[in-house]
Amino acid sequence: MIKYRWFWWTAVLGLLELINLAPPAQAFVVRVLVEGPRPALDIAVSVPATLVQDDGKLIALAPLRFHRITPNMHGTLTLKNDGRGYTMVGGRWYPDTVRFEPLGGGIAAVNWVESETYLRGVVPREMPASWNLNALMAQAIAARTYAYISRLERKWGPHYDLVDDERDQVYGGFAQLDARSGQSRNLVHPRSDQAVVSTTGVILGRGDVRGFYRARAVTAWISDGKGYFLPQTRGRVMDQNVTQHMAASGWNYNQILDYWYKTPLYRLQEPAPRSG
């Protein structure tokens, strides 16, 4: 039986409503491990929602209360809402569907989330939203490519495709609860949202390019006696700091990505270009 206790959060519904956008047609679903496995998880929902058990039993969840999820609740639980709601796990609010799966003797929360929605929670965590828009657009495409390939390869096995930390890409959902103040603060940003929307469905075109990136991937600059320039041994990893300098100097996102990955771009649901 689910245990709960009353706990209200000021203005959380208004905050989350402001950041709700419909996913585009080019989106694909990724499964992200966001919490656990743990002996139990305390969760909350922003709107009335329903937990569906493996045996078909439905459990109604009231909004803005804590509900406890345990491994002995009839297998995998799928949390469904009306499409506008969010689920809080581990102090963070997540969009779309959350599934609770018995794993490793405990219970794990896996966010089944549309790719473009997922990227809204990734891009501002991986690159400052204050950076040049072309740098943010390059970041969005690299991160989308990484998520797409991880999904295709079922990187982490049958239960999830990605984890939410530096082992893959940092993803914190859409908002974080401050338990002391009862306020939730946004983890998404309008500028990084713009970068995601402006590159909807676009990924790196060559299959062996995974979209890897690092804060500092360039370890040395080459001198020709007159000045310094980037080394030409590239094709696998994007340097985020150098990308920001490129964008600030007038490079557009396509030029930046062509420099780092040496591959064309294409939009999902379109034929992939042949690698030459």
Image (cartoon, helix red, strand yellow):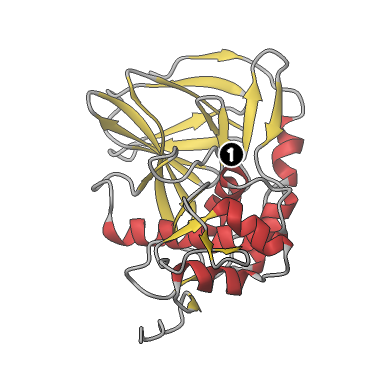
The type of residue carrying mark 1 is Tyr
State the residue at coordinates (77%, 29%): 11
Q: In x, y percent, where is residue 170?
A: 49, 41
State the residue at coordinates (61%, 68%): 199
- Is 74 placed above or below 181 here? below
- Is 65 placed above or below 153 here? above
Q: Nearer the viewer, residue 77 or 185?
A: 185
Tell whether 269 sits left or right of 15: left
Q: Nearer the viewer, residue 248 or 229?
A: 229
Q: Point out the image quarter for the N terminus.
A: top left
Q: In x, y percent, where is residue 151?
A: 35, 57
Tell whether 77 sits left or right of 252: left
Query: Where is residue 200, by image quadrant?
Result: bottom right
State the residue at coordinates (36%, 86%): 274
Looking at the rendered structure, the secondary structure element under dot 1 is loop
- Neighbor class of circle 1 (other Cα within 10 Å; few <14, some 14-19, many 20+) is many
Q: In x, y percent, where is residue 97?
A: 47, 45
Q: Nearer the viewer, residue 228 or 105?
A: 228
Tell whether 188 sits left or right of 4: right
What residue did someone put label 1 on? 86
State the residue at coordinates (62%, 30%): 176
Q: Is residue 266 visible?
A: yes
Q: Nearer the viewer, residue 267 or 114?
A: 267
Instruction: Name the residue at the front extreme.
Output: 225
Q: In x, y percent, where is residue 266?
A: 49, 78
Query: Where is residue 45, by image quadrant?
Result: top right
